Every structure is written in C-alpha cells, then in structure tokens.
Image (cartoon, coloured by chain):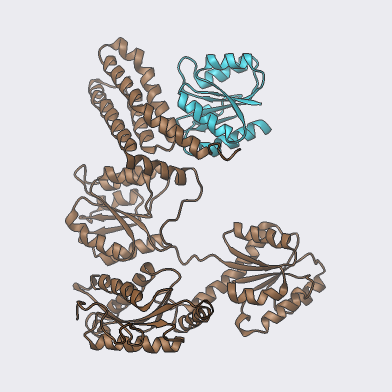
Amino acid sequence: MSSSAPTLQQKLNQLRQRFIEQLPARLQQTATKWQQSRLSAEAESRLAPEFHRFFHSLKGTGRSLGFERIAMLADQGEELLKAMPDSAGHAVNDINSLIPELFQQLNEEIEYLQSQHGQQTVLASLNSVEFSSVAPQTRSKRQRLIYLCDDEPDQVGQLLHHLRCFGHEVVHFEDTESFFNAVLTRRPDAIIMDVQFPQGNTAGTETLTSLNKLIGERLPSIVLSSYGDFYSRLSAVRAGCNGYFTKPIKPLDLMLAIDELTIPLDEEPLRVLVVDDEPDAATYHSLILEEAGMIVQQVNHPADALSALDRFSPDLLLIDVYMPVCSGEELATIIRQQSAHIGLPIIYLSSETDSQKQLSAMTAGVEAFITKPVTPDELVSAVRLRAERLHLLRSLMTQDSMTGLYNHSTTTDLIGKTLAQAYREGSQHAMAMLDIDHFKTVNDTYGHLAGDQVIITLSRLLKTRLRISDIIGRYGGEEFVVLLKGVNAKRAAELIDELRHDFELVDFHAGGERFRCTFSAGISSFPNQPSTEALRLSADQALYLAKRQGRNQVVISNEDDAKGKAEPNQPGAKKQ
Amino acid sequence: MQILVVDDDPLACEMTATLLEFQGYTTVMANDAMEATQQLDSLDTIGLIVSDMHMPLINGIEFLKMLREQGVTLPFILLTGDSPDSTLMQTPGLNACLQKDAELESTLGNAVTQALNG
C-alpha cells in the first residue's frame, strides 16, 4: 500500500462520517412513513417489514461502526416492533408514543454526534478503543479517570475535592443520561454512582446494569445511596457493583475503596537480562519473554553483563552456556562472587543434553538448566517462577509494609545512586523532608488506628501526586523523604506546598469524631548539598525551622535559598 | 479470487467490503439477492459470498438455499444484526454466521480464512 492510500481506520472513519451524515434523512423518511402507517391497517402491514429492516440495519451497521448508543436505541425499536402484532389495544397505544420517542432520541444522538465535540470524541475513542487491542494510556500510571454520577450537587463537592486532591481526574454528571453517553465515548477507570434519581428509586444501578450489558464487561463501580435497605443493596449487587456506601459518606473511605478497585497490586513487569553471544538467539528468547509482558534487555558479550546488571537491575539472568571469551558457568561464578548479586536467579540456556555436564554447570549456583530448543511456554514459566520469587523477596526487603513506600535503607540507597548519576550528568535534584504535625497528639487523642490512617493517606497522596520517577520513602514514624528529580529548591517547595494545602483539607474520621492534619516540610537541593547525608541534614534543618515557625509550612534550607536565608515558602501560609 | 458482498444497506455493504479489502481480498458488491445472482452469472472469479441476513424480498438464508438448489457450492458467510441463534448457524451449507458488531473486522477475517482453507 502506498503511503498516500488511506489506512483502514481512515476509511472506516469516512464511513462513520457518512453514516452520521445520511442518518437524519433516513430517520426523517422513516418517521414520515411511520405516520402514514398509523392511518390504516393496510398501510401498517405493508410498511411493517420496512420499519423492521430500518431498525435492524441501523442496529447492525451502528454496532459495527462503533455507535453503540444508536445500536442500542435501534435494538429497542426492533423489540417494540416484534411485540406489535400480538398486542392488545393499549400496547399499540404505547407503540404509538414509544416509536416516535425513539425517533426523537435517535435524532438527539445524531445531533450529539454531529456536534464538534461529540464527533471528535466518538471518532477519537473509536480509533483507539474499539478497533485496537491496546487502549491508550494518557494519564500517569497512578492517576485514574473517575465518573461520579449524583444529582445532589451539595453532597458531591467534598468528594470531588478529595478525589482530585489525590490526583484523579473526576468528571461529575448530574443525570444518568449524560453519564451513559460519556461512558460510551470514553471509558472511566471507575464509577461512583448514586442509586436514586428522579426517574426512579434504582435508576442509578439500572443504568449501570444496562451499560454493562451493552458493552459486555463489568465496569468497576461503587454505589452511593441514602438507603441501606435490602432492595437498594440487591439492585447494586445485581448491577455488579464492587462497593456500597450509605450517605453521608466519609470521602477518605470512598477514596481508599476506589484505590483498591483500580490500582492493581504492584504489578511491575519482571525484568530479565539475556546474555547470549548469538544476537539472533538472544532476540528470539527476548521476544518470547516480552510477549509474556516482561521487560528484557540483551547483552551479546559476557564482559558487558556486569555493567548491564547494575544499570538494568534485572529480576533474573538468562545465560547461554556456550559462549566464546567465557562460558556461562564462568560468568555465573563471577556474578555470584559479588554480594549484591548473590540472590539473583540465573537460568542456563543450552543445547547441552548431557546430564553430567548439566550437573557440573549447576555447581556455579544456577537455579535451572533449560535445553534448547525451548518451547515459549516452557521458557516463560521457568523464568516467571524464579523471577517472581526474587521480585517478592525484594519488595519485602525494600518496602515499608504499612505504606508500600521505600523503607529507610532503600531510599538512602536509591538517592545515593541518583546522585552518582547526577554528578556525571550535571543535573539538579531537590530533597524534601516531611513530618506530620502534632502526630503524637493524633495518636493520643484518636488512637493508633487513626494515626495509621493519616500516615497511609499522606503516603498515598505522595504516591499519586508525585512522578513515578521521584523517589518517595518513609524514613520511619511520621517522617517521609522525597527526592524530586530535575527540579530546583524553589520549584520543589511549590510542589510540596500544593500537597500541603490539599492535605490540610482531608477529613479524617475516628469513631464519631472528625479531624484534620497538617505537615511541615524542609527542602534542600543538589548540587548545593553534594551528598545524600548533606541533603538530609540541610532538609532536616529547614524542617526544624518550619516546625519552629508554627508548623504547616514549607521552608527551603538557607544554604539552598537564593536569598541566602531561610523563610517560609508561602508567607501567607496558615499556621497551626 | 473475489468476494461477493451482499447487503441492502449500501453503507453496510461498503463497510464489509472495506474490511475485506484491507485484509487483502478484492470485492464485488450487490444490494440484494437478485443483483448478487446477476454478479455470480457474469463473473466466474467469485470465490466466496458474504451476505447480510435481513434483506427485502429474499433474505440471506433464502439466498443461500436458492444457491445450493442451483448447485452453487461457493463458501457462504452470513452476517446478522442479531446474536446468531444456533438453528440458523446449523443451516446446511453455511460456513459461518457472524454478528455485526465492533469485532467484525477480526471475526470476518477469521471466518473467511477458515472458509477458504477448510
């Protein structure tokens, strides 16, 4: 195909465009005929097949072209017509009003699709969603698109604030109709749905049920309701909802439920380093593993393996046994001699079938020996089994169990590595030390569970709002450390101050009581402070100053401050 | 080899043809069974038929039966707006019965490959 020829997507989009353009005339024509058919029994039976065909064709073509709502309305029309010949008088009366109503709804849908916005979003979403196996990931890994459908605006203000405060994109709908259309054009990661609407006591859950049926999948959803009765709950269960909250809602509980629903358990892909002197073989094995969702790097010379290990830090090493320069066995021994790589799983890959030779190779401390040619399934499962074990062990070793943030030693280690690289690149970074204000009072007044809730919330706030590349660690107790990469002290202070402002508005609940918390922060920067320790000391001093000046503020260390003296980043900052 | 696409909705007909053309086939279109019969009579390059079910006068399944009675044994794939029911799918001589939906691009591609190779 030449480069100027249209792609399938372009061609289908042209057809979609024409479908939308032609539809009003077709609809008009059919509506006129419908009126005629109402005049006599003869006209009715003569025209009946035509209406049936109209709706049927609209359903099939609409669905094939991705206009799901049009297809759904057409399906309703077809069902109505099917019921028609057997109906008694009053059913026919229903039809007399229902079919024109359907025409009207179809017209409205076309108008929506024809509007600049509607058309663009539908076409864009069709391009990326309906005809491609991979949906685009435009938001950061931790941010979510959440649809909140509730017709009581006064109740949702606080909810919106909390969800947005955690970096989520939240769209609010006041009626189920606009919510329905929005889901069809752009799928959210999660839905928060009110049960009761003016149209009915369970209109919210009914909308979810029909949506799920229409799109053939269960959308992650949480239901809000003023009622905790059996039938309201039953309607939510039947709609496939994942959670049920009765009003008034504690926003933080809802937020945590949304997190549970949308954030998969740390699903970082496994990393595999392939060492093979034959590039073709290395590429073949890499492809198999990549196909299974792993991140793979290949090295074609054993001498490059060590630096690749440091740079790439894989969860597993796949080594070809027979290589020039050094054998796989020798390479494994070299790697095992270094304490940093003692736990790294190593798998040999070889055409060697002599079990005696295999056994001798194993003495270098490898986990498994796979003989070539290996089937893709066998390779993937051998690698996954061993790499996952290390992956899990590593996360237990490096993460703080309550917050999932890096623990003290890992944070220090990672910051050290980043600084070593920053020296070479001449880049700048900023460190922030954060400490929750009056944390002891929180524990004493509201109990340790409430204290834990505050710590978890701040850690989630940091995780969702900062970049994935930033290093976020819990230094112990109520103290956190963050390395913001590539920014200066001033910018870091602005970013942390935004978080400070949002955090002070989060409502915590303990028993029947409600309370709020604040944090103070100190900022230092590299290369003003040339080492991890110097950064920490400097940030700590600034944090101390922030506390002394009244807490709930961000202070830049005086050695880092352009003006040469420490002062609150926000002169108007509220003091506790 | 060409594929004959039969559908009374010109746009739907074109869409099906487009999907097939992007999979490397050449197509001929007809807007009803009568027109399709004329195409079959005049072209001997047609190797497969993809027809819509709901069409005026002669529907897809009647068209298939008509062809089989006339001794035409070309592979025949039926498209329908409904979810295909089992009795329809078991119609003798029918290679596949597919629902018109957003997956049509892949389902049709597979069905054609299967019909031509099987």
Q: How many marks?
A: 0
The hue in which chain B appears in the rendered picture of the protein: cyan
Residue sitting at x 21%, y 77%: A573
Q: Position of residue A293 (x, y in %)?
A: 57, 59
- The answer to whether residue A222 is seen in the rendering is yes
- Between B90 and A400, the one nearer to me in the picture: A400
State which quarter of the image contains the C terminus of chain B. top right
Q: Quadrant of residue A78?
A: top left
Residue sitting at x 36%, y 68%: A465
| Residue ranking furthest to the top | A42
Residue sitting at x 33%, y 58%: A169
| Residue ranking furthest to the left | A154
Q: Position of residue B37 (x, y in %)?
A: 58, 15
Q: Is residue A246 left or right of residue A348?
A: left
- The answer to whether residue A64 is seen in the rendering is no
Residue sitting at x 30%, y 56%: A170
Q: Which chain is brown?
A: A
Q: Reply above or below: A361 against B85.
A: below
Q: Position of residue A278 (x, y in %)?
A: 75, 64
| Residue ranking furthest to the front | A563
